[in-house]
Amino acid sequence: MSTSAELHLSPRLQALLIACQKACVAECCGVEAFDFSPLHVASFLSAFTGRVNADETATLQRELDVLAEQASHENGLLCSISGLNQLFTLEELHGLVRELKRSIAASPQMVELSDRLREDRA
């Protein structure tokens, strides 16, 4: 079976994925090494400011749209993403994009909940 060219991530999107590498390392377990939950995504997005920046989330959402669009041109053949050590069908890639977009969208609420819990302890 032939594979498509490897898809490449923007530096910021690649940094987000690396931050979600929790269970193992991509070189060993591929996409199973990652936890793309809103918790880890929010932690990455709020690491320096304690807040999730709306412009940054919008940029990441657009970059994910571009990634999905790139793969759509591959006629459903297998593709890979730089740094993930995983082959994806078009359907699997779109599922990953949806999961990441949901977690990015939920990130502000995760930070808000964390802030409320911190206040409750005080």
Image (spheres, helix red, strand yellow):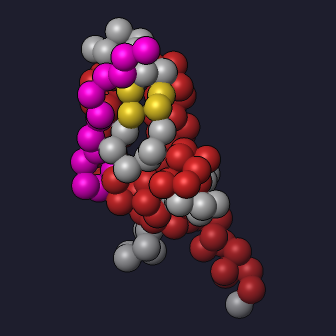
Q: Position of residue 119 (x, y in %)?
A: 67, 81
Q: Quadrant of residue 79?
A: top left
In-front residue for pair 19/58: 19
Q: Quadrant of residue 51?
A: bottom left
Q: Which residues are magenta?
A: 1-13
In-front residue for pair 25/102: 25
Image quadrant containing the C terminus: bottom right
Residue 63, relative to residue 34: is it above or below? Answer: above
Q: Residue at x 47, y 32 (%)?
A: 87
Q: Position of residue 90 (x, y in %)?
A: 45, 19
Q: Is residue 3 magenta?
A: yes
Residue 67, relative to residue 111: is it above or below? Answer: above
Question: Is 59 displayed left or right of 92 in the figure?
Answer: left
Q: Is residue 77 magenta?
A: no
Q: Position of residue 117 (x, y in %)?
A: 70, 74
Question: Is 31 displayed left or right of 62 in the figure?
Answer: right
